[in-house]
Amino acid sequence: MTETVLFAANRGYALTSSREAIIRRFLDGGWRVILATADDDEARYLAGLGATLEPVTFNRGGLAPGTDWQAWRRMRAIYRRWQPSLAHHFHAKPVMLGTLAARQVLGSQLAVVNTITGLGHAFITGGFAARLAGLGYRSALPRGDVTIFQNRDDRDLFRERGWVVEAKTRLITGSGIDLERFGYVDRTGRQAAPVVIMIGRLLGQKGIPEFTAVARRIRARWPEARFLLAGEEDPIHPDAVTPAWVQEQGGVEYLGCLEDVRPLLAEADLLLFPSYREGTPRAVMEAAASGLPTVAFEVPGVRETVRDGETGYLVPDRDVDALHSRVAELLGDADRRLAMGRAARQLAEEAFDIRAIQEQYWAIYQELVGVQA
């Protein structure tokens, strides 16, 4: 009988960007792989490898009773049809709705793994949305077999609030980076005008306002400096920022959503990443692999990827003055900037290698359902 594994995520990109190798490994081992995610190009690409796509719409912007109800019903139908022996959910809605659906349909017949990739808008804004999200986690996570956290702060928060069972938690830093694909870029002797970049969705909580504020200040001193912003629009999100708003601020060039960020990383001298909270930010890990230092807020998730004073700088949360000061310091000191970039690459090799991280995931699958190495 063919064994079945199910992966659930908000969208296909979350599965292709760092989990394609695991999906291939299951397929090569003769497993049937079900993808419960958005019907998008990335999900269809994985289906082309042999996986089966079961489209589900998960609302990423907070409370959406109608969409959430439909997603829960859809997950129940998928579990009833395929009856997997292993399921792995990523992101808040798939974790909550997927876990509850799995247990309601199949009970203890399958192993359930959940990965907390970040706490997002509800926890940043607080209030009713945060309380409701907490209720969802409290209901779902104890029913899973393993909950994986990408940073210590999130794990400690969930443990303190009683949302997880201590013995069922694991800590795996991020999803990993292909260090061959994201190779080191030697920027020694570069004479071009300085380029500061930011990569992230167009959301206020990603620090877009702070990025534009620093850009204005820096360009008052270095008019030739360029500030480049790359990231997808998310217009339905309650914290959305529009490209028009970015352009109105002046001093920032919006590049849209890039299919390949490596040319941008190669052009850059510094990553400015003023996000308010992360799981483990992929943009910072990719920048580190390419030899870019990062200036960021000292917040959960980000502090896992930047060694303050060594691979970049961490400053107090929402402190634009401190952000500006550190960016100005590094733009004015090429030797310091290059040394931090080299240290960032070393950190990437030590901590962000996707192959090592995937082996940690695979070890959990082996422990739960005995998949072959």
Image (spheres, helix red, strand yellow):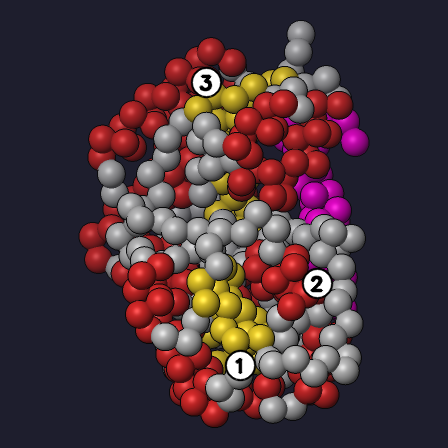
Report the Cα–Cα distance between label 2 and label 1: 23 Å
| Residue 131, placed above or below residue 269 | above
Numbered range of the magenta stretch: 345-373
Work out whether residue 360 or residue 21 is closer to the camera in this orientation and state it.
Answer: 21
| x then y, percent, for residue 27 | 70, 23
Q: Earlier in the sequence, mark 2 or mark 1?
A: 1
* Main SS category, magenta section: helix
- Amino acid on which disc 2 is placed: Ala
| Residue 122, placed above or below residue 140 | below
Q: Badge 2, how many Cα within 10 Å: few under 14, some, many 20+?
A: many
Q: Earlier in the sequence, mark 2 or mark 3?
A: 3
Which residue occupies 22% across, 31% down?
66
The answer to which image quadrant residue 140 occupies is: top left
- Amino acid on which disc 1 is placed: Ala
Report the Cα–Cα distance between label 2 and label 3: 39 Å
Q: Quadrant of the C terminus?
A: top right
Q: Residue tagged by mark 1?
A: 225
The answer to which image quadrant residue 55 occupies is: top left
The secondary structure type at the circle numbered 1 is loop
Left/right of residue 251 with respect to residue 198 in the rendered view? left
Label drawn at residue 113: none
Q: Residue tagged by mark 3?
A: 79
The secondary structure type at the circle numbered 3 is helix
Q: Badge 3, how many Cα within 10 Å: few under 14, some, many 20+?
A: many
- Amino acid on which disc 3 is placed: Tyr
Label drawn at residue 289: 2
Q: Are marks 2 and 1 in contact (CB under 8 Å)?
A: no
